[in-house]
Image (cartoon, rainbow, N blue to C red):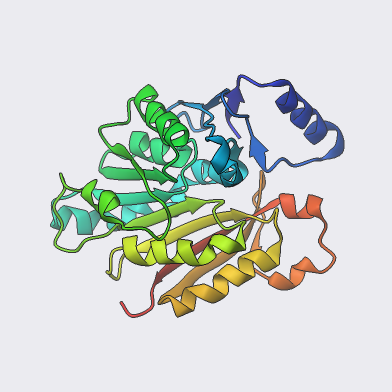
Amino acid sequence: MGTTEVAAPEDFLSDSLESLYDHVPVAHSTAGSLFTYQPFTGGPVISLMTPDTQAANWALHASSIWSSSLYVAEHLDDLHLHKFASITQQESRPLRVLELGAGAGLPSILLAKTFHNVFVTCSDYPDPDLIGTLAENAKRNEAVDRCRVVPFAWGSDPSPLLRSQAAHTDPVPGFDVVLAADTLWNSDTHRLFVKSLQITLKRAPHARIHLVAGLHTGRYVLESFLKLMPEAGFVAEQLEERRVGGTEERAWSVERADGEDEQERRRWVIWMVFKWADC
């Protein structure tokens, strides 16, 4: 993981725990600290201020850089954006990507800096402090020309998100790719999140949803989400467990919950890909 950051004391403690006790953190950085991401491949360096929220929205847990977000940043090629080239060239428009629950905005900003034919709409809950920091991060990394920050509460009117595409006409509204990292940890928000996927993903055969989630609230929480997706008209194209910091991959299985402790859960993320079932 090619990252550096200006760390608070609690971050040094987290790093020490990882080194001494094989403790794998699920979150990095703290509210108000500067986090710098530098890919091993020599891509663009991304500097992010870790956001905070107003007190009423503390339950969003948006004041960290989550491991799933870092995992997406390190595996952008697994979004397979090159597969969309013929479609966007034919329609003379950029590939349109939406990130839900973006937090500090690492995947969105990195995508905008890495792929010149991608227009990213970067969204999170309409908390003024959170959205302000997210917008400043886009400016700090000179990504505002291809990365627009839009406040959006899951399940609400998607018009503000879709208006962010106004400069890029398209006969079919919606996004080619919807991306989210670590947005499934709370089962109480699953239905609103699924509705958001329904109203933002372009109704087209090529459109895809990529979700990357940690296991820190357990496998049964993710299983409850997966049961909602077919009801919403989506079919899973890929459900894969991937080892953080390694290369091991295996098929998703909720049965692993039996006998799996917290430390083992922290070592894995789940990469999910969905598409419309009727397209």
Q: Position of residue 37 (x, y in %)?
A: 52, 29
Q: Position of residue 63 (x, y in %)?
A: 58, 35
Identity of the residue drawn at 25% across and 32% down: 145
Q: Which quarter of the rendering shows the N terminus?
A: top right
Front-lying residue, 49 or 126: 126
Image-based side of 237 in relation to 165, left or right: right
Image-based side of 162 in relation to 262, left or right: left
Do we see residue 226 in this rendering? yes
Identity of the residue drawn at 81% across and 69% down: 258
Identity of the residue drawn at 37% across and 31% down: 135
Q: Is residue 193 above or below residue 103?
A: below
Q: Which quarter of the rendering shows the C terminus?
A: bottom left
Q: Position of residue 111 (x, y in %)?
A: 38, 40
Identity of the residue drawn at 44% across and 29% down: 133
Do we see residue 62 in this rendering? no
Q: Is residue 42 above or below residue 270?
A: above
Q: Position of residue 172 (x, y in %)?
A: 19, 64
Quarter of the image where one finds residue 255: bottom right
Total number of numbered labels? Answer: 0
